[in-house]
Image: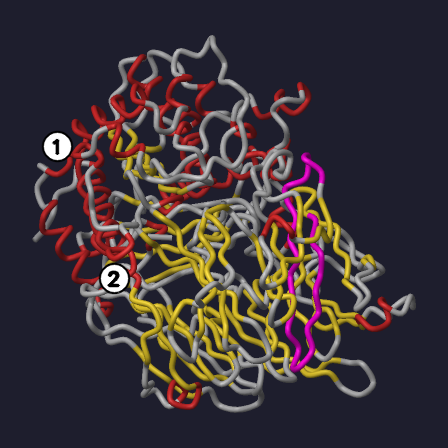
Amino acid sequence: MADRAVVLKIAPSMQESVTMHLRLPVIALLSLSASAIAQIPVQTPAQAPAADPADPNAYLEDIHGARALDTVKRWNTRSLAALEAKPGYAAYRQRALDLLQADRQIANPDQIIGDQVLNLWQDKSNVRGLWRVASLASFSSGKPVWRTLIDVDALGKAEGKSWVWKGATCRSPSYDRCMVALSNGGGDAVEEREFDIPSGKFVADGFVVPIFKTRLSWASPDALYVATDYGADSLTKSGYPRIAKLWRRGTPLTAATEIASATQEDVGINVSVFPDGEQRYPLVVRDTDFFHSKRSHVAQDGRLVPSPLPDDAVINTVLDGRLIATLASDWRGVPAGAVVAYSIADVLAGRAPAIERVLVPTATQAVEQVDSSKSVLWVKMLDDVSGRLVSLTRRADGRWTQAVAALPTASTIHLDATAGKDDLAFAMVESFLSPPTLYAVRPNAQPATVDTLPGRFDASRMQVEQRFATSKDGTKIPYFLVRKKGTSGPVPALVHAYGGFRNAQTPTYLVDQPYRSGPAGLFWVEEGNAFVLANIRGGGEYGPRWHQMPLRENRQKAYDDLHAVGDDLVRTGVSAKRKIAVSGRSNGGLLVGVAMEQRPDLYGAIVMGSPLLDMQRYSHLSAGASWIGEYGDPDKPADWAFISQYSPYQNLKRGVKYPVPFIYTSTEDDRVHPGHARKFAARLEDYGDPFFYYENPEGGHAAGADKIEDAKRAALVTVYLNTQLGTAPQR
């Protein structure tokens, strides 16, 4: 359920699967009939228990039910008519579209396969994108020569599908074939098809896995490890695969051989394969909850040999026959947050491996991402929420030496891709006011600029500060404040936060922030207001303990942190009570739903995206059961006792003057069920409280399938904020 403000680019063939943790032309739901929407394919992950018959809004859990869609259509019609008529809407939408679909973009290296680079390119002519390939040499020079592999827009048109690109898993070490993942409408469920890179065509009679939340990897040139829907009893309660099988070419999927299985209470299972030069290391991963997994190495004879790592460690990569992982808790004298390594050969041989300390962060640091190149380990870190990139090499005595890449400070760094045949990494660097720049980085060498974007707005008129608020328990909570230079006196403020699932919130260029309502933050600052990014607990800003502090019964700590930031804005004269808006998506949608109810005196507007709101039912809706490790189990009385204290749907009260929220979601969100947003809106309506609601028929958890929809949402959010906080467009 990860908020994609955390832009981790994880090559499926390189990293352990991330369970949670996205964009069709604009089609207003009001223009579609219930029967038309019902034709959009959706994969129902598991049969949810019947909704509470005593809940008058239970019918809204029926995603494609005619009555539910009629209600949604009514809300959409009313809300869009009101918001699109607001001053400036058309201008905001057009400018957002121009910014998001600008011809001048950086081609991100989505994945390096051998000596080639893969990229998905999207612009105004290629809304869904061109999947293409270039040589690593030409890409590194800054003048890539691209060859188109798949035109996603054309493929969708030819097949009568609303295809959205979801990545590719390529077989090593040849990297000539890939399993391509395509979502019909933008949800998490995908169809997997085998594609041949040299010919640029789908493989005739190749591997095809029907649409589902499938997890797969290459077992050999002619076999796949596949965890998918195999029929009765093959799914967990979270709706993910329970059984992993080995599927050989030339045989039907039904004849695949079972490798391992999970229980129905587990989140799911997968077999990850980590390439390491010419070697490949498969690892069975049985996720017992969102943060704990049982892992076993697969020996050549098929035996499963357990990993010695603790269940909460995060598997990163394999380098020189060593499994690399980041600890989430103290283990064998090594502190939580540290990166460790061990010899896979020792484990397979039955020997107790030596545990090597690769990197131990300081109290202000956090490891965000780890990847490997030919002989170097790359670690993306935060230090007081500022990015740094470290390269590490292993000496003959087993010690690891490190060097810090000379990249711009006070920035966000994205480790985009690493090369397997060379010690080369590509890093994107940006900040609120600095446009993205792509660097080619080698150990102990000055990074080389591959490409940089020109500025898209006048940053010289703006300033960024990092401040710290004090939460209720005395914890210092960092936040970033962006304003025009010389701003004085209280001004309206927009605070974005997330606060969960280890996902750190870091500064990104104000133009393109899809999980923070696109360029709405830019428009907000340009018009004299304040934009705030709050680094509340629950994220990964300071490592595992920062995430763990507000888990389960301690969830209120995250909400106290957000309130502390809002109160600090008032105390320091940045803003004023009821002139503060808070925005959040997914878990952040839950956060702002709680904020709306706990502090209606403080907040004047609530931007609530793809939210969890009915925390009594969340574990029975879509992928909800996979998040019990974060929130607790509402079916257990002891857990419901603390969850019930904040669950927004249950805590909404009649007669309270709440801020008027803007709620948005997607009919095809197969991660966070749209019933959360629907039922909350229905209860507001029943209580006579005003709200704005927009449910996009497609787009999945991102609530939009492309930049066109992102631009529309940015405009809707901006005019909503202007309306609720009493501001007006200055153009």
The part of the image, by quadrant, that contains residue 679 is top left
Residue placed most toward the observer, 414 or 568? 414
Element carrying mark 2: helix
Residue 153 seen in the figure: yes
Q: Which residue is mark 2?
A: 154
Residue pictured at 73% horizontal, 69% vertical: 323
Is 275 magenta? The answer is: yes
Note whether 292 is above or below 410 in the view shown.
above
From the image, give the main secondary structure of the stretch colored magenta: strand
Q: Secondary structure at mark 1?
A: helix
Specify few, some or many for label 1: CA neighbours under 10 Å numbering under 14, 14-19, or 20 or more: few
Which residue was labeled with disc 1?
Answer: 81
Q: Which sits earlier in the primary sequence, circle 2 or circle 1?
A: 1
Side (left or right) of 121 relative to 357:
left
Q: Please tell me whether residue 66 belongs to the stretch shown in magenta.
A: no
Q: How is the image coloured?
A: secondary structure
Residues in magenta?
A: 263-286
| Closer to us: 300 or 144 | 300
